[in-house]
Amino acid sequence: MAQGIYKNGEHINLVYQAAGGATSLTPTGLVYDEAGATHTVETTALNSSLTAGELGDGAYAGGFQPDAEGHWVVVIDDGTGDGTASKGYQVCGFNIDSIGDSIPSQLLLTKSNLVSAVKADVDAMVTSQLLLTKSSLVSAILEDTNASTSDVKSAVLTTTSPAAIS
């Protein structure tokens, strides 16, 4: 997969600024595909959009839609001899902007899942710790109770015994 900023199959908008802000021109362009060959369909579309209307101050809008991944080049000339401009476009299988938009929501989802997991672990640990503490307390009370009961039994046995110590 090629690395790039623009996605294969998505329209790339262009604004051509004529030299010196010249108006009423008919700029023409050539679109070269990833193989370096003139891409006739895209060149025709670009020329049609550039001649469709001027944006003002010598700026003309146009665009093309690449149909393959790779390095595409656009060359636009306004016919005055002063206004030839070219620009390259790295086209790939994904749109970098849409990936950037999805990252924050993915991070929030991951963060939310992590917080939920930690909370569940803490709740489970607190519950387990409370049960353990409760169990320890109950055991201690039972030990004390058994010890006290033994003492009481001994005292009772001593009291009911035929021998007595005064």
Image (spheres, grey):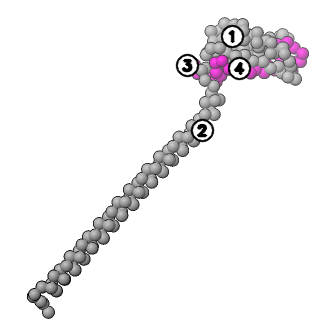
Which numbered dot is residue 121? none
Which of discs 3 and 2 lies nearer the camera? The answer is 2
Q: Secondary structure at mark 2?
A: helix
Q: Which of the image's four quarters has the C terminus?
A: bottom left
- The residue pinned by badge 4 equals 11
Tag 1 or tag 3, which sits nearer the N-term?
3
In the rendered structure, the answer to whether residue 89 lies left or right of residue 82 reads left
Distance, label 2 to label 1, CA atoms, is 37 Å
Q: CA distance from mark 3 to mark 4?
A: 19 Å
Residue closer to the observer: 43 or 164 = 164
The residue drawn where x is 84% and y is 14% is 51
| Amino acid type for the residue under numbered disc 1 | Tyr
Residue at mark 3 to residue at mark 2: CA–CA distance? 25 Å
Q: Which residue is mark 2?
A: 105
Q: Any mark on residue 32, and which?
A: 1
Helix, strand or loop for disc 4? loop
Quadrant of the rendered image containing residue 106: top right
Q: Which residue is mark 3?
A: 1
Which one is earlier in the sequence, the residue at label 2 or at label 1?
1
Residue 154 appears anywhere in the view: yes
Where does the magenta region start and end? 1-27
- Cα–Cα span, label 1 and label 4: 15 Å
Pointer 4: residues within 10 angstroms few (<14), some, or many (20+)?
few
Disc 2 residue type (three-letter): Ser
* Amino acid type of the residue tagged 4 in the rendering: His
Seen from this angle, which residue lies furthest right? 24
Point out residue 57 in the picture as x, y percentages from the top left corner: 87, 23
Of circles 2 and 1, the one toward us is: 2
Label 1: element kind: strand
| Circle nearer the N terminus (3, 2) | 3
